[in-house]
Image (cartoon, rainbow, N blue to C red):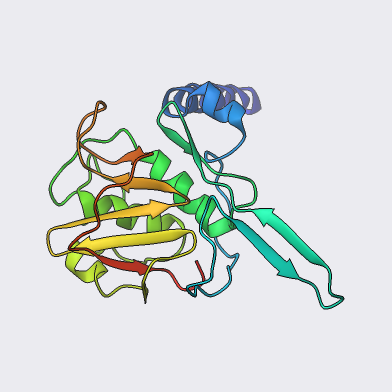
Amino acid sequence: MRLLQKGTRARFFVFAFALAAIVFPASALAAGGGLTPTSGTEKGAPYDPATPTPGSVECTLTPEGTRTCLPIAKATLVEEAAVFPTTAPGAVKAAIYSANRIRTKPYVWGGGHARWWMSGYDCSGAVSFALHGAGFLDVPMDSSEMMNWGVPGKGRWITVYANPGHAFAVIDGLRWDTVGDSSGTGPRWHEDMTSTAGFVARHPAGF
């Protein structure tokens, strides 16, 4: 019986490793970020107009008067998977990890609203999936509901842009959107920004 259990475990680990190799490219794994589940319990500083965004420099002053400045690095793309910087808060890493899990799914109207794991996702379903992975949502939201979610304005690490017909997010400097590109229509990462005219900007408190 023990030999049978060991054999079953071995086959399971081989299968799991092969599946991971398909879903997550080896080069992205080698890059060292974005593909590992992390805790979403870390909290950032409250957002204000002076709060730096990814790509800028953040300076802090210790009680002793020592000033330390560190860059807020953007996430990068490796074979269409987002790779987060090690300096990102845990919740941001978790959002990126979650989005990576569905980054090859097709666009399906209503996808991501009946349940979390589905064969395809629409715009708000894809954004909801990423936010849920970070611990910011318990149930999926449509784009109209996202217009009143979180805190008004752009966030430091995560910003959700929503109107009654569409929603997308910018997570650590990368756009998470379902618009079509060379990889097809569906949840995808984009390095370029798109117009935010007509959208409401919201963000999770502290991020």
Picture quadrant where residue 158 is located:
bottom left
The quarter holding residue 102 reads: top left
Q: Is residue 1 left or right of residue 79?
A: right
Viewer-side residue, 103 vs 67 = 67
Inspect this view and state whether residue 9 appears. no
Residue 154, above or below 185: below
Q: Is residue 150 left or right of residue 78?
A: left
Q: Residue at x 72, y 58 (%)?
A: 69
Q: Is residue 27 among what the camera can see? A: yes
- Taking the view exactly as shown, the residue that stands out farthest to the bottom is 63
Residue appearing at x 59%, y 44% in the figure = 85
Q: Give coordinates of residue 178: x percent, y percent.
A: 23, 43
**Quadrant including the N terminus:** top right
Image location of residue 36, percent across then percent down: 56, 41
Q: Which residue is drawn at 56% across and 27% down?
A: 13
For this rendering, which residue is in front, 115 or 105?
105
Q: Which residue is drawn at 43% across and 55% down?
A: 133
x%, y% of residue 34? 53, 41
Above/below status of 136 relative to 48: above
Residue 50 placement, left or right of 162: right
For the image, the number of numbered tags is: 0
Indicate the quadrant where residue 127 lies: bottom left
Q: In this view, does 119 lie to the left or right of 22?
A: left
Of residues 8 and 1, which is closer to you in this image? 8
Q: Is residue 172 placed above or below 104 in the rendered structure?
A: below
Q: Is residue 63 above or below residue 183?
A: below
**Position in image of residue 92 (x %, y %):** 51, 55
Most distant residue in the right direction? 64
